[in-house]
Amino acid sequence: MPMKTVLRIVINILYACSFLFVVEKIFEALFIANRDNSSSLIWGATERTDTLLGIGMICAPVMLVCLAAYKLNNVENSTNKRRNTILVFMPGIICCASIVYGVVRGLFLLLQVLFSWFIGLLGKFKNS
């Protein structure tokens, strides 16, 4: 068997594993994980937030596998290039969206903490 065929099979197996992992985590985030997670280091985090941030942490490997699958499967030469490109990169797009969600959620939590600190500071001046 030629080396390119073996590499293509390995990349397709890795792509299938990453696709199934992302689908499972999205299913978990949408339908299963909705309890508060008191052991989390993030204030106000739920299991859903932890799951989505976990998806975001594997973004780089998933994007690399998507890119390798795109190149080795000749998606750029297919008849419906746009649809196939979106389908191949869908796990990577979901991972990148999870990173954006984590950054926005972190900024909102930071603003919430700063706002509560500022209100507490105003209360000290008001009582003095």
Image (cartoon, grey):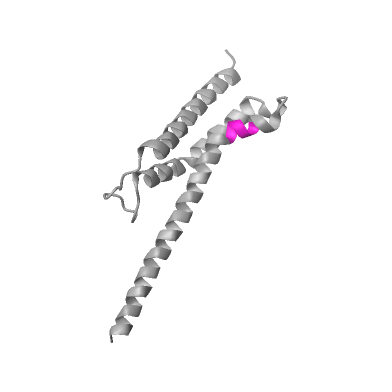
Q: Position of residue 73 (x, y in %)?
A: 63, 24
Q: Residue at (30%, 48%) from the top-left corner?
A: 36
Q: Residue at (66%, 27%) from the top-left corner?
A: 75
Q: Quadrant of residue 118?
A: bottom left
Residue 36 seen in this snapshot: yes
Seen in the picture, residue 87 relative to 117 is either above or below; the reply is above
Q: Is residue 87 magenta?
A: yes
Q: Position of residue 40 (x, y in %)?
A: 30, 50
Q: Is residue 22 magenta?
A: no
Comparing 96 with 47, the one in front is 47
Comparing 105 with 76, the one in front is 105
Residue span colored magenta: 85-89
Q: Residue at (49%, 27%) from the top-left corner?
A: 14
User: Is the magenta region chiefly helix, strand or loop?
Assistant: helix
Count of number-bearing discs: 0
Residue 67 seen in this snapshot: no
Which quarter of the rendered picture does the N terminus lie within?
top right
